[in-house]
Image (spheres, grey):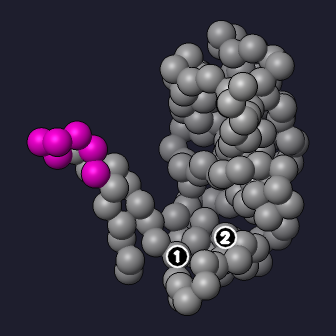
Amino acid sequence: MKKMIRIAVDAMGGDNAPEKIIDGIELHYNKSENIYYKIFGNENLIKPIINKKSIDKKIYEIVHTDEKVEGEDSAFTAAKRGKNTSMWLAIESVKQNTSDIIVSAGNTGALLVIAKLNLKMIENIDKPALSGLWPSKKGMSVVLDLG
């Protein structure tokens, strides 16, 4: 049996959140196996949306918080906003080993700063990199933005 992958999801980050984020979870769920979602955000907004989806209730939990990082926040304002934002809590779940990875469509600068504050860097690596998939003639390639 494959190991279950635990994905922390910042449900409050990005445009049209949490609706678009829950749509993304449903799409991923329908194409994946052995996944468990820890969804961080306002449960009062998330529950009515997720209850309409074809997502098995056994493969997710909602971790409630009223606080979120705003798109207009500077990275440092977001970090100062507090440890109760959906983004901070999702990143912290990776630090505490209750999640394996974090996904956020929110404020990229805030994501990098909060992650750097909470997670250890690989030895001899000074700064985080952003990665993205890039289509090529041979399939998909991973592209890194190293700043």
Q: Quadrant of residue 114?
A: bottom right
Height in image: 134 above or below 16? Answer: below
Q: Exactly how many numbered labels are in the figure?
A: 2
- Name the residue rendered at 77%, 39% in the picture: 38
Q: Amino acid at mark 2?
A: Ala
Tell me which secondary structure the magenta stretch mostly adopts: strand
Residue 68 seen in the figure: no
Residue 36 seen in the figure: yes
Measured in 3D between alpha carbons, the distance from the residue under mark 2 to the one under mark 1, in whole angstroms, is: 9 Å
Height in image: 122 above or below 84? Answer: below
Instruction: Tell me the residue that label 1 is attached to.
Output: 128
Horizontal relation, residue 95 to residue 113: left or right: right
Residue at the extreme left of the image, as rendered = 137
- Quadrant of the snapshot with the C terminus: bottom left
- Name the residue rendered at 71%, 50% in the picture: 100
- Name the residue rendered at 52%, 76% in the picture: 128
Helix, strand or loop at disc 1? loop
Indicate the position of residue 141 as horizontal and vertical percent values: 28, 51
Task: Residue 143: say if magenta.
Answer: no
Marks 2/1 in contact by CB < 8 Å: the verdict is yes
Q: Which mark is residue 115?
A: 2
Q: Nearer the viewer, residue 82 or 117?
A: 117
- Name the residue rendered at 22%, 40% in the picture: 139
Height in image: 79 above or below 102? Answer: below
Part of the protein shown in magenta: 136-141
Height in image: 129 above or below 60? Answer: below
